[in-house]
Amino acid sequence: MRLDVESAKKEIMRLINGEETFILNECVTCYACEEYCKKGNHPFYLITELQESKGILPAPKPIVKQWINMAIPTRKDTQYFPNSREPVISLCLFPEFMRELRGKLFEGVSFILGRHFYCQLAYLHFGKPSVIKERLPKIIENIARHGFKEVVFFHDECYSTFTSYANAYGIEVPFRPVHFFEYLYNKLKALEDKVKPLNVRIAYQRNCSTRLTPDKEQYLDRIFELIGVERTQREYDKEKALCCGGIFRGQQRYDLFVDVQRRNVEDMVKSKAEYCVFNCPYCYYTLAERVYKAGIRPIMLHQLCRLALGETLR
């Protein structure tokens, strides 16, 4: 959406007053307005509340229903991990990464994962905040019953749920959420004498939920400095970042999906990046192949850190 300042003010006031506005129909749930608002008024959360109350779904109903049902626990889902000890990493719904989180950075780590620990924040993309508010207290209870003082969240959306979203809605979180960036930086700092600078140029794929908690990127920049990589200067990075486009495809906005991916990858190529570094698994699954075909190596952040420690990836 492109608006001049005066038009933007008028539409924001319509949102605040709960009135009809084209914003509710045109919003593609990129989360950007959450970051642009420096006063902590949570405009994006307001948009999703109004979308739901007015029956304006950003995606077709069958897709919304499919996503809602996806996170319902089954008999195969573990609700309690009796042998888990801190440091503990929550893997959300990404069990495939257990075999990768190995080596010096992850010695002595326990994992919790599965639908009983799924943060639910993805439903913001589908105009269904009520699902989050209904399920989140039980998710917090499932984690808290382990008695952890701190929990490291591998999935960025999980971290943003237990910090930004919980704070916005006055939901108590009885443990300290730790972002994966902070964990990686502290471990790398402790292993600094074993770090070998990689001396490569990287483009960072900034995922959408980073906009809910952008302050954590201080750890990301410290990690890049510590392992000797250069984050290339790009048009579409940091506050001007383009997302992976995966949600646009899910919303069946295919023209936007293609356009965003094209501009994003062309920008990476223009910056002469050798690697595209991902933090979000969903971003990786959505964009990695296109990045690879453009001559840039896709890699997850933890993999890059392991390379800097001289470890071999599978």
Image (cartoon, rainbow, N blue to C red):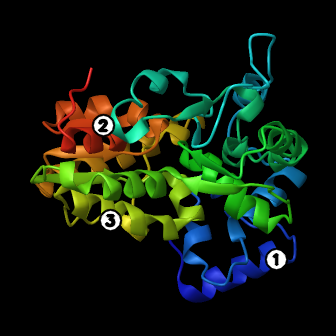
Which residue shows up at 26% across the image and 59% down it? 224
The amino acid pointed to by label 3 is Asp
| Secondary structure state at the residue bearing disc 2 | helix
Callout 1 secondary element = helix
Q: Is the residue 193 above or below the residue 21 in the image?
A: above
Q: Nearer the viewer, residue 264 or 42?
A: 42
Amino acid found under the numbered disc labelled 2: Gln
Tell me, yes or no, whether the two marked residues, 1 and 3, touch with CB atoms within 8 Å: no
The residue tagged 3 is 221
Look at the numbered discs 2 and 3 and tell me whether their residues touch, using CB distance below 8 Å. no
- Say how many tags the image has: 3
Please tell me in which quadrant of the rendered image residue 167 appears.
bottom right
Residue at point 48% right, 25% down? Answer: 98
Find residue 128 and report its horizontal and vertical position in percent: 80, 45
Which of 273/236 is in front?
A: 273
Does residue 311 appear anywhere in the picture? yes
In the figure, 237 relative to 248: above or below? below
The label number, if any, that marks residue 280 in the structure image: none
- Nearer the observer: mark 1 or 2; the answer is 2
The residue pinned by badge 1 equals 16
Amino acid type of the residue tagged 1 in the rendering = Ile
**Left or right: residue 250 compared with residue 232:** right
Return the residue at label 2.
303
Q: Give the image quarter of residue 66.
A: top right
Q: Where does the image place residue 171, in percent across and percent down from the top left?
A: 85, 60
Question: Is there any visible trace of residue 54 in the rendered image?
Answer: no
